[in-house]
Image (cartoon, grey):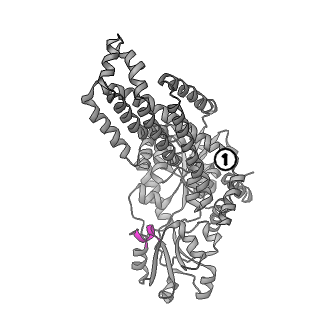
Amino acid sequence: MTEAIQEFFTLFANQQEMLLELLWEHVQMSFISLLCAILIAVPLGIVLTRTRRLAEPVIGVAAVLQTIPSLALLGFMIIFFGIGTVPAIIALTVYALLPILRNTYTGISEIDPSIKEAATGMGMSPARRLRKVELPMAMPVVMAGIRTSMVLIIGTATLAALIGAGGLGDLIMTGIQRADQSYILLGAIPAAILALLFDFILWWTEKAKRSFMTFSIVMGAAFLIVITPAIVSTQQEDIVVGGKLDAEPEILANMYKHLIEQDTDLSVDVQAGLGGTDIVFDALLVGDIDIYPEFTGTAYVDLLGEDPSGMNEEDVYEATKEGIEEAYSVTYLEPMDYNNTYALAVSEAIGEEYELETVSDLELYQNELTAGFTFEFLDRPDDGYDAFVETYGFELADVNGLDPGLRSQAIEEGEVEVIDAYSTDAYLVEYEMIVLEDDEELFPPYQGAPLMREDVLHEHPELEGILNTLAGEISDEDMQEMNYLVDYEDADPEEVAKDYLQKNGLLQ
C-alpha cells in the first residue's frame, strides 16, 4: 500500500505540467457544455410552462436521450461532427439537458397561482412577471438541476478522451490501458475534486441569493474566459495522423509524422488515443484524420466482415487492400514486418522447465499447467480458446477467466503459467514471457499498415513512397521493446518513434 502511494506521488510530481493542461481542457469542455445546456434547457423549460400539453413529450425525449450509453453517443457524433472537442461538447450538452429542463419546468409550474395573479394585478407584463417573480422564486429548484448536470458532465467528460477531446480522461484511459492504478488515480481524483468544487460554487451562488440575471452575467463572463484561449490557440495542420487507444498506434502515428515532416514541407498533427476501430475508422471517413495505422486482420474481419482463417500474411493483406479500397475509397499501404496477433505465452522459467517452444508442446503438460485467459479470448469463436481446442486437439485441464488488468498480477504471483497475449504486448518484456510458436497457424495475421483516404493520396502522392519506407520494418521484438518503454518506463511515444527511426537509418 505504501509503495502504491509513493508511486502515485512520484507520478504526480513528474506529470504536473501535463496534469494542469488536461485539467484545463476538462474545465473548458465541462463549462462550455454546461452553459450550452443552460441556454437550451432554461428557455425551453419556460416555454413548456406556457404550453403544458407539450411538456410531457418534450421532457420524455430529453429522458430518452440521457439513457443512450455515453460511449455510443460519442461514437455516433463522429459521423456528423468528426473527432475532438466539438462532438464531445454536443454529447455532454445532450446529457445535461434533462435535469435542468425538468427542474426549470417544475420550479416555475409549482409557484402558487395566487402569487402570479397578484403580480399580474399589479400591472406586470408576462415578461416582467417572469423576470421579477417567477424566475427568482424558481431559482433554488433550477440551480439544483444545474448542479446535478454539472456533476454529470464532469464525470461523463472523462470518456471524451476516446474521441480526441482531451481532458482528464486521457490519464484514466492511459491507466486502464497500462493497468497502472497511479495514472487512473491521477485522472480520477482531480475529476472528483473538480466536480465538488463546481458544485460548491453553484451552491454558494444559490445560497447567496444572486438574481438570475446576475448569475447569467457571471456565467457569460466565465464562458469568455474559458473559451478565448481555445480560439486563440486553434491551428490547422496539413496532415492529421490518428491512432487507437494504446501505446503501439501512438508510436506508429509519430513515426508517420517524423517521416512526413522530414521529406516534405507538410505539418503533421498526431491525434492518438481515439478509442477502438469503429471510432478511428469513422474519423478517417469523415475527414477528421487523414491516415492511421490499422492491422490487416482487424480490417479484414471488422471492416470487411470476412474470415481470415487459413490465410497467410500476404493473402490477408492483398484481400484486405483490394476489398477496403473498393468498399470505402481508402488506400492501404504496405505492411510492416511485425505481427500483433493473438499468442499463447509462458514465463521464461516455465518455458525452460518444461522445454516449451511451440503451442503443441503444451499437450504433454495439459494437466499440470494452469491457464489464465482473458474473457475475450475465451469467447472468440474463430481465434479464441474453442478454436484452439479444435485446431490443436487437446484441452488444458485448469483454465481460468481473467480480466486483462489482473493478468500481470496472476503471473507475478505464480497463479497461472499460460496466458493469452498479443505478440507485441509490453508486459511480455516486463514479466520475461516467451511467445510459443503457433505451429498449427491458428491465429490469423495482424500486421500494421497505414490506412489513408484516397483524396489525401491524390493531393499528396509523395506520401505513399514516404510511408512505404516502413514496409517490412519493425520486428515483433522491436515493437515489444518500444511498447515497453512507453507503458512501463513512461517514455514519450514521439521520442521512442524518433529513436527507432534514427537507429535504423530511416530518419536523419
The N terminus, quarter of image: bottom right
Residue 193 visible, this orientation: yes
Location of mark 1 (residue): 18
The answer to whether 228 appears left or right of 74 in the picture is right
Question: Which residue is painted at 44% across and 51% down in the image?
Answer: 278
Query: Picture quarter containing residue 7?
Result: bottom right
Question: Which residue is painted at 68% across and 66% down in the image?
Answer: 3
**138 lies above or below 291:** above
The answer to whether 109 appears left or right of 34 in the picture is left
Q: Position of residue 232 (x, y in %)?
A: 63, 29
Question: Which residue is painted at 39% across and 15% down in the image?
Answer: 128
**455 lies above or below 343:** above
Which residue is at the far top?
A: 123
Q: Amino acid at mark 1?
A: Met
Q: Position of residue 373 (x, y in %)?
A: 48, 73
Q: Is 371 part of what is drawn in magenta?
A: no
Q: Secondary structure at mark 1?
A: helix
Query: Picture quarter containing residue 433?
Result: bottom right
- Mark 1 crowd level (few <14, some 14–19, many ≥20, 10 Å Cα): few
Query: Picture quarter containing residue 345?
Result: bottom right
The span shown in magenta is 374-384
Q: Is 377 part of what is drawn in magenta?
A: yes
